[in-house]
Image (cartoon, rainbow, N blue to C red):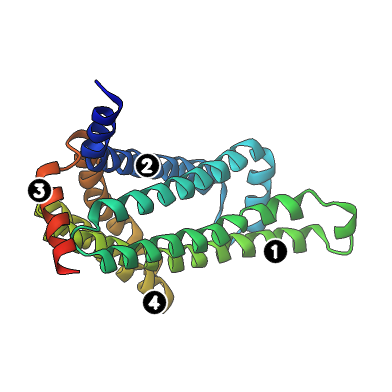
Amino acid sequence: MSKAEMTEHFREESPRLKARIAGACWLLCIVAGMVGFIAGGPLIVANDAAATATNILANESLFRFGFAANLISGLSYVGVTVFMYYVLKPVSRSLSLLAAFFGLAGVAIGGVAWVSNLVPLTLLHGDQYLSALTASQLQALSLAALKLQTHVFFIGMVFFGIQCISIGYLVARSSFLPRILGVLLGLGGTCYVIASFANFLLPLGARLMPFVVPVALIGEGSLTVWLLIKGLNEQRWYEQATQQRGLS
């Protein structure tokens, strides 16, 4: 195969390849996010600062591992956002770009939330410059930082939810991916948005998450699996891309 043929072959394979890379990044994001929650979540005891501090100090390596897993999840979602923009821009470049904006904004907000995880590690080690505060005060501040992380997390989920709704709409309108995948993803994104606003407006809003997460995982998981295994219909992708260029 000549160099020109290899270049043309890569160009032809590029949409499917990028779809599969998006699926791989999405899978890594989901798995790393679940690992981060499983590692750090059980260490936090609601409304008990002393018990939470004891758990974190006794399992500091696990707590740090959870932070690293969440960081990997966020970085991999940047990959999801970039490659899904490329995959879906033949449907609507402007809406695909808007979806990418919400995705990157969600990652940025999530980064602020993850930084809050470092606050307890700083406060609970009791360095010399913190000697003006009592142990109880340091523990209370640590738990407050973790609670703030939860609120910031839900703000980020609003942006992720809007991105999922946008991507779902684009998938449903595309000719190269199954419409049902877009419907399921849009439904999951809607659940993210509803649960997030419920957390802001209702005292028990956070309790909706056990019902929301399965619905969202069905939407994200089904599209992820399809992208990894099938990729997309390249012929229809190029046809829709050509049609989009003709309209612009």
Residue 161, how many percent across, how many down? 32, 64
Answer yes or no: do the residues labelled 4 and 1 have beta carbons within 8 Å?
A: no
Q: Tell me the quarter of the picture where residue 56 sits.
A: top right
Question: Is residue 157 rendered to the left or right of residue 240?
Answer: right
Give the CA separation, mark 3 to mark 2.
23 Å
Q: Is residue 246 above or below residue 77?
A: below
Q: Is residue 164 above or below residue 52?
A: below
Tell me the amino acid under the disc marked 1: Leu
Tell me the amino acid under the disc marked 2: Cys
Give the CA separation, mark 4 to mark 1.
24 Å
If you read the primary sequence from the N terminus, does the residue marked by circle 4 or circle 3 appear first?
A: 4
Q: Which residue is mark 1?
A: 141
For the point 50% across and 67% down, the residue is 151
If you read the primary sequence from the N terminus, does the residue marked by circle 4 or circle 2 appear first?
A: 2
Picture disc at residue 15 = none
How many other residues sit within 10 Å of disc 2, few (<14), some (14-19) or many (≥20)? many
Q: Nearer the viewer, mark 2 or mark 1?
A: 2
Picture disc at residue 202 = 4
- Please identify the quadrant where the C terminus is shown: bottom left
Picture disc at residue 236 = 3
Q: Which residue is mark 2?
A: 25
Answer yes or no: do the residues labelled 2 and 1 have beta carbons within 8 Å?
A: no
For the point 20% across and 45% down, the residue is 222
Question: Is residue 138 rendered to the left or right of residue 81?
Answer: right
Tell me the amino acid under the disc marked 3: Arg
Tell me the amino acid under the disc marked 4: Leu
